[in-house]
Amino acid sequence: MPEADPKASSNAANKPKSAPQKAMEKLGLLRDIDLALHLPMRYEDETRITPIAEAQSHEGEAVQCEGEVLECRIETRGRRVLLVKMMDESGAELLLRFIHFYPSHQKTMAVGTRIRVRGELRHGFFGREMVHPTFKAVVEGAALATALTPVYPASNGLPQAYLRRAVASGLSRADLNELLPAGVVPPTLPALRDALNFLHHPPPQARLMTLEDHSHPAWQRLKFEELLAQQISQMQAQRERALLKAPALKAKRGGMHEQLLAVLPFGLTGAQQRVSEEIAQELALPQPMHRLLQGDVGSGKTVVAALAAAVAIDAGWQCALMAPTEILAEQHFKKLVGWLEPLGLKVAWLTGSVKGKARQKMLDAAADGSAQLVIGTHAVIEDRVKFAKLGLAIIDEQHRFGVAQRLALRKKLASMDLEPHLLMMSATPIPRTLAMTYFADLAVSTIDELPPGRTPIVTKVFADSKRFNVIEKIRDEVANKAAQVYWVCPLIEESETLDLNNATETHAELSAALDGYVVGLLHGRMTPADKAAVMAEFTAGRISVLVATTVIEVGVDVPNASLMVIEHAERFGLSQLHQLRGRVGRGAVASVCVLLYTGPLSDTGKSRLKAMAETNDGFEIARRDLDIRGPGEFMGARQSGAELLRFADLQEDSVLLQAARRLAPQLLDKHPQAAKRQVERWLGAKAEFLKA
């Protein structure tokens, strides 16, 4: 047998990829199992032919007809339109109308050709017609499809016909053998291969409703498998974490955390005291803490983090605090320096804008241990940043960081065979169901009480047509009450796809309308120094109105700001709207948040604005946001590039979730290889994300 030509195989490997191949890679369709699990979003019924004379279609429903082309011509009345007239054996005619077409359309539907068309039928001026139906040339008596035709999620450059062939091929090759021992899968559910074959090619009599709402037993089997893999992975992570070692950071009587409490200009709320004690108790253990500190906007998480840092530093270890933006990192820096430096602590500041000798000085201080607390942005996790003894890592707004970034911070102590304790903070409260499902090995501390003196925020929703009235209200506020105002815009520059006013234009508009008052501008393209200068002016009260993009979303604290306008509010996510709203209401003055929207609103847009108007409760906001968007954003999964659950729904599939949670430890204990293969099949590399 002749040997393979290495040059030929090399040429095949270097052959440029086609557009469909690139599109499939972008969708993550790389392996046979990926294709087998790429499920249809809907189906088309091509199993029957309806005589044209009997054809009726209701809104959204399509029918399939077959006949001979009588006429094919291009009409030019204002714009070019391809008109095709066909007739079937009943003698009834059907007009096909194509506004967008190619020369190949005319060739396929030439006069005398027999064609099969499928589309939504309507009764026009010239009788029955279809606009842009699907079509193909056929011979008389050509076989019909025997199953419903799948329509898959796709992207540009990936035709359905190509994707259908690829999925069918992957499905036939994929290893879909049963991995789970007998008795584990509920007896009401089909075998995995049977379930997938059914979902890709359901018979004509299948109930579409059960397929579309994912209640069919075939769908239930997939959900069960996925949830079981996810629960096994979580339980495995929990067991692995229990074997890891961390420095035991014990709080000292009369130590630094007690000294900090004594010098704070305010007392802690009951909730702050409770969570501080929970954190201190876990820091004292020789296993790494993996805790989420959650609390609504303005509930006082920073001081709890400062107390945890004081415990770690008092025990002789370093602490790192990472924030998603320089504005927020700088605010933490100023607060913590004010609280901790009088106690003799050295705090280092490390962000992308710290350059040259100043940066090297900070790096040296972290590496030799003289900087007991290092505060910064993602610059803190760069390879060049070394810590002498990192005992506690604090991540603020954890959902804003990708899982890879969180994992990198945890590995900063690897040289000592220890892991730092990890405290993640979030002002986007995570619903209990989500925390239980995704964070099996995560302790959750909740600050469910706001500090005294906070005033409730009134939220009002207006159409953009009321914009002039809103600007007049701003003039009254800054003139009569010397109040300060945020005006939030979603974009910095014009976009061809989104008809949004940009921050620069809005700044010019408000500067003209509010003559005599200083209107500032803050956006992401400004240098860190310029951003800091604008924020300093606003904090000092020298800027009356600050036009900003979402760089002010988290952490900015200006007590005198009592009015916020969010432009194009329908474009923001619910938790983001709540975060933005939390920038006002931080002082004693009654505060208002105005949501300006541009119609028409989608159902999702209506739900978001309704929720904002009805409640200030961050936990209720989080619950509604989970209903609207799903769990990805809470987890920071967006930055990981992969959803952690594709098929299961945490709310609707709670029964399957409980079964998976019950079975996971049994499989790990009695069938560890089956458990391992289950995780590999369903999660692959994503299992690492669950450990972050």
Image: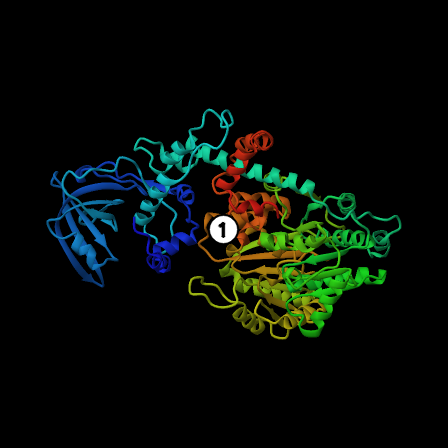
For the image, the number of numbered tags is: 1
Up-down relation of residue 599 to residue 526 (above or below): above
Q: Quadrant of residue 510?
A: bottom right
Query: Measured from the top left, where is residue 222 in percent x and y?
Result: 46, 35
Q: Is residue 157 visible?
A: no
Circle 1 residue: 605
Residue 1 lies left or right of residue 89; in this view the side is right
Up-down relation of residue 458 to residue 180 (above or below): below
Query: Measured from the top left, where is residue 327 in percent x and y?
Result: 66, 64
Query: Measured from the top left, where is residue 340 in percent x and y?
Result: 81, 60
Up-down relation of residue 226 to residue 292 (above or below): above
Q: Amino acid at mark 1?
A: Gly
Furthest-front residue in view? Answer: 1
Residue in view at x 88 percent, y 48 percent: 253
Residue in view at x 36 percent, y 56 percent: 156
Residue in view at x 53 percent, y 65 percent: 468
Looking at the image, which is closer to me, 120 or 158?
158
The chosen color scheme is: rainbow
Classify 10 Å Cα crowding around label 1: few (below 14), some (14-19), many (20 and above): many
Query: Measured from the top left, where is residue 481 in percent x and y?
Result: 69, 64
Looking at the image, which is closer to me, 460 or 139?
139
Q: Is residue 519 visible?
A: yes
Residue 138 lies left or right of residue 661; in this view the side is left
Furthest-right residue in view? Answer: 254
- Dot 1: what SS? helix
